[in-house]
Image: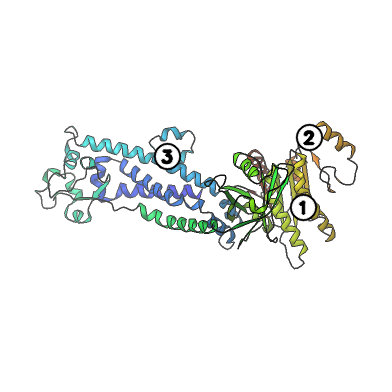
Amino acid sequence: MVWLVLNLYLFIDTFHWYEDEDAYIYTRIMLGSTLAWARASATCLNFNCMLILLPVSRNLISFLRGASICCGGASRRQLDKNTAFHKVVAYGIAVNASKLFCCCFCSLPLNYFEFHTIHIVAHLINIERYHNSQSKEAGGLRNKLSGLGKRPNESYLNPIRTYETLVRGQTPHSMLLHNVTYCKDHYLEWEKATQCPLPQFSGNKPAAWKWVVSPVVLYICERIVRFWRFQQEVVITKVVTHSSGVLELHMKKHGFKMEAGQYIFLQCSSISPLEWHPFTLTSAPEEDFFSVHIRVAGDWTAALFKAFGAEEEAFKELWMLPRLVVDGPYGSATTDVFRYGVSVCIAAGIGVTPFASILKSIWYKCCNPNTVLVLQKVYFYWICRDPSTFEWFADLLFLLETKMVEKGKNDFLSYHIFLTGWDESQATHIALHYDEKMDVITGLRQKTFYGRPNWDNEFKQLAENHPSNSIGVFFCGPKNLSKILQKMCSSYSSVDPRGVQFHYNEESF
């Protein structure tokens, strides 16, 4: 919304300036209102070119996320949409720069079309009017203005013959000598009347660089920081293959500092020197290593599995493993879990990885008697299709469950695991052992639910349990479920600001 308001302001302000400025009276006579349309949209183009690099400056975004003084909760949630905002700005610039804007119109919001394609359309009309003003049929003042520049002491207004600056205005010195108000209606007296010497024209000095120089310098600094990180050695200390088709990598890197819920970019030059892939960190900041869990979900991850010998019976020696390059860590929405008194963490499938880091960090904080937590209650939901996926995560939940009992904080963590896929033999096994104290699937005290959660019931219960709290809802998973949860947060947030408020945060790269 702020971006749209700024675009509107710049467009309207520039439009009125070119419509009212005396230096462009003769230019407007030749071109009409399309002069103002072209220049106003050009200002919006410059503004968006200034913004295009900022959302992809990951270190800047991470810095702003961590600067709580200048970046509150609502602002941090907007920072999590940096990739979407980058696309918005890029579409606007692309539409402006391309003559095929009609092809993009149907897939873009109306404001893109209004603010950016009109720059091209307006200049196409300007060129046509410049051409027409040269013909004898144009007659009058337009023809007179178009003919300027043929003699040595004249400066041109119509750029068609020279193919130079498209938009020119009267020079300040010429405006002092040439009474535009009188002379525009008495063009036949030019060079004859004292108050009507030939008007002199010039183009504007290049100004686009002023818009982009600061972001470009900032982005160069960003790339230097990333390059410095690329050169730092990454030591792989442990490789684990889980039966669920998940590869677990433990790594160390000098000076690496992380927060719970952050992510990194990985590059494996033996697979592709150009590809970088984001992975959420599954280790806790309190551990002396950092780790990721990678599921096969495409050509690159399949190649990584093969390169690390995950498909072989015996693992490769650590020194034989391919070299990995790490960029990061970078902040994400889930790093705000500890800022709320009550947090709801919802994961689907492998989307559980950011919460592994958070739950581990909670465990370490509970072990430290000197740690004071703002967070007083955590609800954890995990929806998964394959029972084998629970394998690597169940151990962490078991440790947490045990620690909470020891500390007398049985109510600190409530977790709900939902299994959405099973075969007939699994169903029989589940039914036979349902009455046992420990869950037959996870080995935990909390029983696994079968099917999908009823989110209306879940959010209704959360609102009843915490009628006056600000509740942070954090999600990592598919888009269709994200839309449902976002709707739930809006529906169950109280109209009264003193009542329960659900703040939705989505994990995105």
Residue 231 in sight? yes
Instruction: Residue 399 in the image: state x and y as whole percent.
Output: 80, 55
Residue at (62%, 61%) from the top-left corner? 257
What's the distance in space between the residues labelled 1 and 2, CA to CA? 23 Å
Residue 413 in the image, given as x and y percentages of width and height: 78, 53
The residue under the point 51% across, 56% down is 227
| Residue placed most toward the observer, 311 or 159 | 311
- Quickly name the residue at label 2: 422
Mark 3 lies on residue: 95
Mark 3: few/some/many CA within 10 Å (<14, 14-19, 20+): many
In percent of the image, x 58 and y 63: which residue is there? 69
Measure the alpha-carbon separation of dots 1 and 3: 49 Å
Q: CA distance from mark 2 to mark 3?
A: 48 Å
Kind of residue at disc 2: Trp
Query: Is residue 509 in view?
Result: no
Q: Residue at x 54, y 58 (%)?
A: 229
- Which mark is first along the chain, 3 or 1? 3
Which structural element holds mark 1? helix
Q: Residues within 10 Å of mark 1 (few under 14, many from 20)?
A: some
Per the image, the residue denoted by label 1 is 396
Count neighbours of disc 2 (C-alpha within 10 A) and say few if under 14, some if 14 to 19, many if 20 or more: some
Amino acid carrying label 3: it is Val
**Left or right: 82 as drawn, with respect to 474:** left
Q: What is the residue that sits farthest to the left in this orientation?
A: 192
Amino acid type at image mark 1: Leu
Q: First in sequence: mark 2 or mark 3?
A: 3
Q: Are marks 1 and 2 in contact (CB under 8 Å)?
A: no
